[in-house]
Amino acid sequence: MATTVVAGLKHPGLRGALGYRGFLRGACARGAQRSSARTPRSEPGPWPPGVEYIPRKKAKNPMKAVGLAWYNLYARTWLGYLLYRKQLQRARHRYPDGHSTVQPRVFNGVKVLPIPVLLDNYSYLIIDTQSKLAVAVDPSDPRAVQAYIEKEGVTLVAILCTHKHWDHSGGNRELRRQNRGCRVYGNPQDGIAHLTHPLCHQDMVSVGRLQFQALATPGHTRGHMIYVLDGEPYKGPSCLFSGDVLFLSGCGRIFEGTPATMLNSLDLIMGLGDDTLLWPGHEYAEENLSFAGLVEPENVAREKKMQWVQQQRLEHRSTCPSTIGEEKTYNPFLRTHCLALQEALGPLPGPGGDAGPSRARLLEELRRRKDQHKGK
Ligand SMILES: [Zn+2]
């Protein structure tokens, strides 16, 4: 079967991007042994320079104590799984055909198929149409994903899981049962259910002509990973499957780690090519653009995108994909370097000295306001 894992920096947009320091060293030992073509790196360890995981014990986490306790119950106990099962039943009843109408994209023999699952999640099936081999990203409703696998007549050989939350990993077990030999990839730091193939930062997963690079992007969870499908082999745009780190005009909540951790992960994504298509884990576009309008009301790019998104949502159509280049023009979480946004947030207390608040402090404030705007 044409599923292999090799390591090494692949995506051209990432060369020279932020370097990594190491909190995954021990955890990735298995991955290192498995990977036979590891490219020598200037620094040991799987984290890019600048992307540093800062645990809550060492730095203040913006979550309130009650929220943190509830989150720990959801993320670390079987209560979370039971809640996910309940949500799954409710969503199947409410949206028997999915919460949105989606349009697959086909590029020279590679098909990207978004699958609307739960109340607002997206799973993805990525198909090499020549070999009929497929990869699923975050298949949280196994029934819905399996239906697409059978409809497309493809063989599922790999699941790429962005992080441990049940609305992204809940279908791993059932899909593995129904698709013999299917491997589950992800970051071992996250304790992903039914993980079979742990990945390190920059590891590659190849299935037919599909070449994915896994990048560690902590902040939403400690072991969050994103996957970049390289467009070069099929002469098309690269595709970013961003899980819960980046959405259209938004970013994920900072559950594990700090604003500085999340900022580093977002900066890593900013280093990808502007043409890269963004396929996020949730349909949050309208809500996110509405919030962006509060902090940057004069942003013309945001206004234009909002008009398009509102039309799409009126007809329950999916709003993905956007591109990284587009996101830079209206996504406030990617614009903490912009003077207009800094002025809109007003004077902020905190470390920054004469240079004003740090970008991490700005991101923290943005995220705080977004959490108050609506809990997403
Ligand atoms: Zn999540």
Image: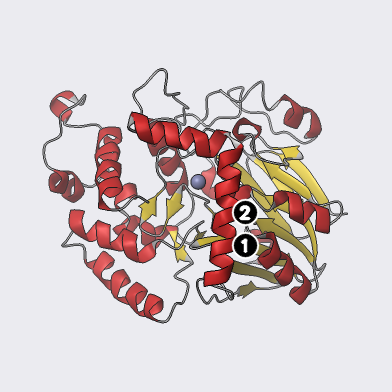
Give the position of the N terminus as an image quadrant. bottom right
Residue 140: x percent and y percent?
A: 62, 56
Residue 327: x percent and y percent?
A: 37, 58
Q: Residue at x 76, y 71 (%)?
A: 129
Answer above or below: position of 246 versus 55: below
Task: Say few, some or many: other residues with alpha carbon within 10 Å of mark 2 (under 14 / 14 to 19 / 20 or more).
Answer: many
> Is residue 143 among the parts visible in the rendering?
yes
- The residue under label 2 is 138
Q: Quadrant of residue 156?
A: bottom right
Some atom of ligand 1 lies within 8 Å of the CB belonging to the residue at label 2: no
Residue 262: x percent and y percent?
A: 41, 37
Q: Quadrant of residue 107?
A: bottom right
Per the model, the C-alpha gap separating discs 2 and 1 is 7 Å
Amino acid type, callout 1: Tyr
- The residue under label 1 is 124
Give the tally of numbered discs.
2
Dot 2 or dot 1, earlier in sequence? 1
The reply to whether discs 2 and 1 touch (Cβ–Cβ < 8 Å) is: yes
Q: Residue at x 68, y 53 (%)?
A: 171
Residue 250: x percent and y percent?
A: 37, 53
Mark number displayed over residue 291: none
Answer above or below: position of 57 versus 347: above
Q: Is residue 207 left or right of residue 56?
A: right
Q: Secondary structure at mark 1?
A: strand
Task: Say few, some or many: other residues with alpha carbon within 10 Å of mark 1 (under 14 / 14 to 19 / 20 or more).
Answer: many
Q: Quadrant of residue 194?
A: top right
